[in-house]
Image (cartoon, rainbow, N blue to C red):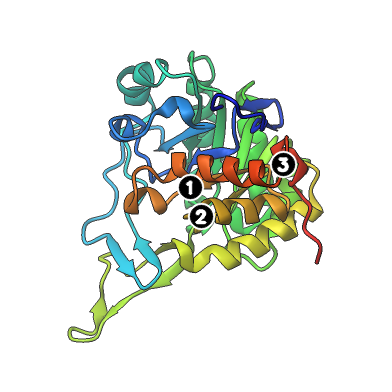
Amino acid sequence: MKAGSTTNMATNIGPLHLKNPVMTASGTFGYGQEYAAYVDLNKLGAVVVKGLSLKPRPGNPPPRIMETAAGMLNAVGLQNIGVEAFLTEKLPFLRRFDTKVIVNIYGETYNEYAKVAQKLSSAEGIHALEVNVSCPNVKKGGLSFGADPKAAARVTRAVKDATSLPVIVKLTPNVTDIAAIAEAVEEAGADAVSLINTLAGLSVDIRTRRPHLKNVTGGLSGPAIKPVALRMVWEVARRVSIPVIGVGGIMTAEDALEFLIVGAKAVQVGTANFVNPLATVEIIEGMRQFLTALKIKNINEIIGTFQP
C-alpha cells in the first residue's frame, strides 16, 4: 500500500489471505520467474503458475498460437516441466517473494490429479492448488472432466482427499450450465472456484482452407470473452457460497472492478500479460486509485454490489 493510502485492498479466498485481489492466470505468466524482471512479484495478490502434470509434457506441435481480432487462440496443449522439476527448479525462486503461490494442476485420470496434489502438498511455499477440470478424461473417450457435474465433483474430492491446501476448481465455459458444475464442486469440498477457462474456437486460413492451428481448434482468450466471463461469474456467484475468482479478458482496472461488482472476490489477469507485462501491477494501482477517488476504504465494500 502506498504511503498515505488508507484503502484496504486485502481479500480472502476461503482460508487464503491475499494482500490484494489480483492474481496471474495460469499459462500466461510461466512459473513467475519469466516475468520477474518486469513485475515486482511482491506486489501481486498471488502468482498462479503454469499447469503441472505428473510427468513432463511437450504440448502440441506448432503453430499453436493465433492472434484474433480481440484476443488470441491457443492450443499449446498444457506443455509443462512436470511436478518434480517444478519442485526442484522453479519453486525455490518463488519462495523469495512475499506473495501467495498457487499451483495449477491437471491429469487425465482421477488418480493422476490426486498424485500431483499429494506431491505438491508437503512443499514449502505453495499456498493453494487450482484444479483444471477442462482436461480430457482418457477413460471416458476424452470428454472434459469439467463438462459433467459428477466427474468434476469426483476430481475435486480426489484432490481434497490428497491435500490439506485450499483447493480452487477452475471451470470450463464450454458447458450448458456452468453454475451447476460450480454447485457440484462446492458440494464435493472445493474452497473456491475460478472462471472462466478459455472458450473453444477455430480460425481458418482462407487461402489454404486449412486451420491456422495445427491442433485445428484452440482456446479463445482476451477481451472478446470478457462479457461471457462476466455473465458466468455473476451466475455462479449467486448459486454458490464459496468464493468466486473472475477470469476472462481483464485488461484494465475497470475490467477487474466489473468482476468484483458482480460477485468475484478476486480476479486473474491472463492474455493482458502478453500485451503488457506490467498489466497486473497497473490494474492493482488503477483499482486503488478508483477506490480512493470514491472514498471507499475497503475493497470488499464493492464486492457483490451489482444491481440488475
The residue type indicated by label 1 comes to Val
Calculate the distance from the C-alpha at mark 2 to the C-alpha at mark 3.
24 Å
Q: At x 67% / y 29%, what residue is drawn?
A: 6
| Residue 259: assigned label | none
Q: Nearer the viewer, residue 25 or 176?
A: 25
Which image quarter is the N terminus in? top right
Residue 190 appearing in the image: no
Quarter assignment of residue 16 = top right
Give the residue number, with chain letter if any, for mark 1. 269
Q: Where is the C terminus found, in terms of image quarters?
A: bottom right
Q: CA distance from mark 1 to mark 2?
A: 6 Å
Kind of residue at badge 3: Lys
Q: Judging from the image, what secondary structure is the residue with disc 2 in?
A: loop
Q: Which residue is mark 2?
A: 250
Precedes in sequence: disc 1 or disc 3: 1
Q: Which residue is mark 3?
A: 295
Q: Quadrant of residue 203?
A: bottom left
| Residue 69 seen in this snapshot | yes
Q: Earlier in the sequence, mark 2 or mark 3?
A: 2
Q: Is residue 176 above or below residue 168?
A: below
Q: Residue at x 38, y 46 (%)?
A: 28
Q: Are marks 1 and 3 in contact (CB under 8 Å)?
A: no
Q: Position of residue 253 (x, y in %)?
A: 54, 50
Q: Nearer the viewer, mark 2 or mark 3?
A: 3
Q: Would you place residue 259 above or below residue 185 in this image? A: below
Asked if marks 1 and 2 touch (Cβ < 8 Å), the reply is yes
Relative image position of residue 240 (x, y in whole percent): 79, 48
Nearer-the-camera pick, 174 or 299: 299
Q: Nearer the viewer, residue 181 or 250?
A: 250
Query: From the viewer's perspective, is residue 164 above or below residue 264?
Result: above
What's the residue type where badge 2 is placed? Answer: Ile
Report the side of 248 relative to 67 (left or right): right
